[in-house]
Image (cartoon, helix red, strand yellow):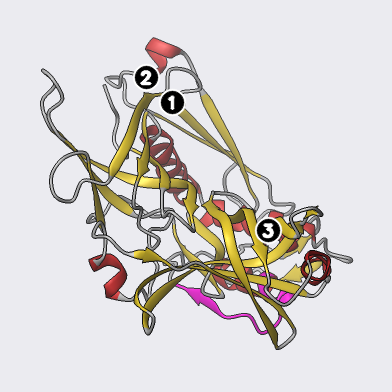
C-alpha cells in the first residue's frame, strides 16, 4: 500500500464521492495546473513501472497549441493525482504518476491535448554508460543499485528496505544501460527497484504473501467488483530454474545450480518434462546462495498458476503492485463462496475520472 495516504480516501470506498483528478506540468520550479478531461494510470512490472494513458487536458487561459508546446518542452515533468472532494473546501489526493510526456498529439479542432507519459524508468532504460561503471567487489548489491540510480538521477530520494546483504563478489564493470545493471542486481538479490509516484525510488525485497491490505468483494455492502475473470495458465508453466555463474574471474565457486519442483507436484518433470527458466548471475559467490535464489525464483513462478483480472468500481488508488489482497467471491448459483488471497501483479488501469480500476493478481501457491 502506498504510504502517506489520507485515511479519508480509504474510508470513502465504496461510499459515494465526487472525483477530483489533478494534473500539473512542471518546467523547473514553474507549475502549470491543467484541467483533466480524461485519463488513466497503469502500473506494470519491468523498467517503466507506470504509464499515464489517454490523458486529455486543457487550460482555460491557454490555447491547445500552447498546452501542446508546454508538454513538448524537453524539461517538462508531469505529475498526476487521483482525488476526492466532499465540499469546495475539503479534498484529499493520492499521487498516481510522476514522469515525462512520451507522446502528445494535438486535437486541433477541439483545442485539447490527449497525451501519454512514462515514469522515469524510461529515462534509465535510455541511459547507457558512456564508459564502464566500475564497482568494487566489497560493495553491497543494494548499495550498487543506489549508486547506479543516483548516477542517472543525482539527488533523488532513495528508500532502501531490501534485506539482501550480498556483495558484488568481484569487481563489476557495468556497460549497457543503467536499468540492465539494476535488473541484474535485483535478480541476484531477490529484490525489486522502481520509481514511486511520490517522487522516491524504492529498493525492496520481492514481496511475498502477507496480510491483505484490502478486500475486493462481489457481494455485500462493500462490493466493488464489477467483473471478474479467473485464469489458470495451461502453457508456459515452469518447473525448473537454472542459475548460471557468469563472473569473469574466479570469485564464484559454482558453475550451475538447478532446482526443480517436487516429484509430487502437478507440474513435475516426470509429467511435463523440463520447463526451464534460466538466469545468468555475475555476483552470487557460493552455490548455497545460488541455490537459495533459484528456490525463491521458482516459488514465484509457481504462483503464476492462477491469476485473476478484477474490474472494480470504485477502485482503490492506494494499491500498489506487490500488495496482498483478499478477493471475496460470494456464492454464485451452485458454486460455493470463496475467499482467495493473492498478490497484485499489475494494475491494468486506474481511471482518474471514474475511479474504475482493473487489477491483475496471482496466487502464491500451487493450484491443482
Which stretch appears magenta?
Answer: 149-160
Indicate which disc, 2 or 3, sits on the residue closer to the N terminus: 3
Question: In x, y percent, where is residue 71?
Answer: 77, 67
Gap between marks 1 and 2 measured at Cα: 6 Å
Report the number of numbered marks.
3
Q: Residues within 10 Å of mark 1 (few under 14, many from 20)?
A: many
- Dot 1 corresponds to which residue? 239
Q: Quadrant of residue 334?
A: top left
Q: Nearer the viewer, mark 2 or mark 3?
A: 3
Toward the bottom, the furthest residue is 29
Q: Which mark is residue 117?
A: 3
Front-lying residue, 75 or 205: 75
Q: Position of residue 297 (x, y in %)?
A: 45, 42
Give the residue drawn at x 28%, y 50%: 325
Q: Quadrant of the N terminus?
A: bottom left
SS assignment at label 1: loop
Could you tell me which quadrant the C terminus lies in? top left
Amino acid at each position: 500500500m502506498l504510504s502517506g495516504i489520507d485515511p479519508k480516501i480509504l474510508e470513502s470506498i465504496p461510499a459515494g464521492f465526487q472525483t477530483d483528478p489533478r494534473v500539473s506540468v512542471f518546467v523547473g520550479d514553474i507549475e502549470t495546473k491543467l484541467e483533466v478531461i480524461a485519463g488513466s494510470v497503469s502500473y506494470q512490472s519491468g523498467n517503466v513501472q507506470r504509464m499515464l494513458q489517454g490523458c486529455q487536458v486543457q487550460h482555460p487561459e491557454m490555447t491547445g497549441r500552447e498546452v501542446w508546446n508546454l508538454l513538448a518542452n524537453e524539461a517538462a515533468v508531469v505529475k498526476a493525482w487521483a482525488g476526492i472532494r466532499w465540499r469546495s473546501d475539503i479534498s484529499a489526493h493520492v499521487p498516481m504518476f510522476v514522469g515525462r510526456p512520451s507522446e502528445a498529439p494535438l486535437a486541433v479542432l477541439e483545442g485539447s491535448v490527449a497525451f501519454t507519459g512514462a515514469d522515469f524508468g524510461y529515462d534509465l532504460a535510455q541511459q547507457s554508460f558512456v564508459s564502464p561503471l566500475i564497482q568494487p567487489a566489497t560493495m553491497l548489491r543494494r548499495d550498487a543499485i543506489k549508486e547506479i540510480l543516483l548516477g542517472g538521477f543525482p539527488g533523488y530520494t532513495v528508500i532502501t528496505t531490501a534485506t539482501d546483504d550480498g556483495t558484488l563478489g568481484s569487481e563489476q564493470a557495468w556497460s549497457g544501460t543503467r536499468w540492465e545493471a539494476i535488473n541484474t542486481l535485483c535478480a541476484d538479490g531477490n529484490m525489486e527497484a522502481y520509481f514511486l509516484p511520490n517522487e522516491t525510488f524504492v529498493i525492496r525485497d520481492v514481496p511475498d504473501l502477507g496480510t491483505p491490505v484490502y478486500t475486493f468483494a462481489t457481494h455485500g455492502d462493500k462490493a466493488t467488483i464489477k467483473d471478474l475473470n479467473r485464469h489458470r495458465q495451461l502453457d508456459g508453466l515452469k518447473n525448473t530454474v537454472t542459475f548460471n555463474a557468469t563472473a569473469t574471474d574466479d570469485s564464484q565457486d559454482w558453475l550451475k545450480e538447478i532446482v526443480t519442483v517436487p516429484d509430487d507436484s502437478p507440474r513435475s518433470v516426470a509429467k511435463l518434462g523440463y520447463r526451464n527458466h534460466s538466469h545468468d548471475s555475475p555476483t552470487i559467490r557460493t552455490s548455497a546462495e545460488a541455490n537459495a535464489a533459484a528456490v525463491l525464483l521458482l516459488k514465484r513462478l509457481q504462483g503464476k498458476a492462477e491469476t485473476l483480472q478484477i474490474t472494480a468500481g470504485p477502485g482503490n488508488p492506494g494499491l500498489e503492485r506487490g500488495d496482498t489482497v483478499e478477493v471475496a467471491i460470494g456464492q454464485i448459483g451452485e458454486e460455493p463462496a470463496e475467499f482467495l488471497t493473492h498478490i497484485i501483479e499489475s494494475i491494468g488501469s486506474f481511471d482518474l475520472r471514474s475511479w474504475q480500476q482493473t487489477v491483475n493478481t496471482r496466487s502464491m501457491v500451487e493450484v491443482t
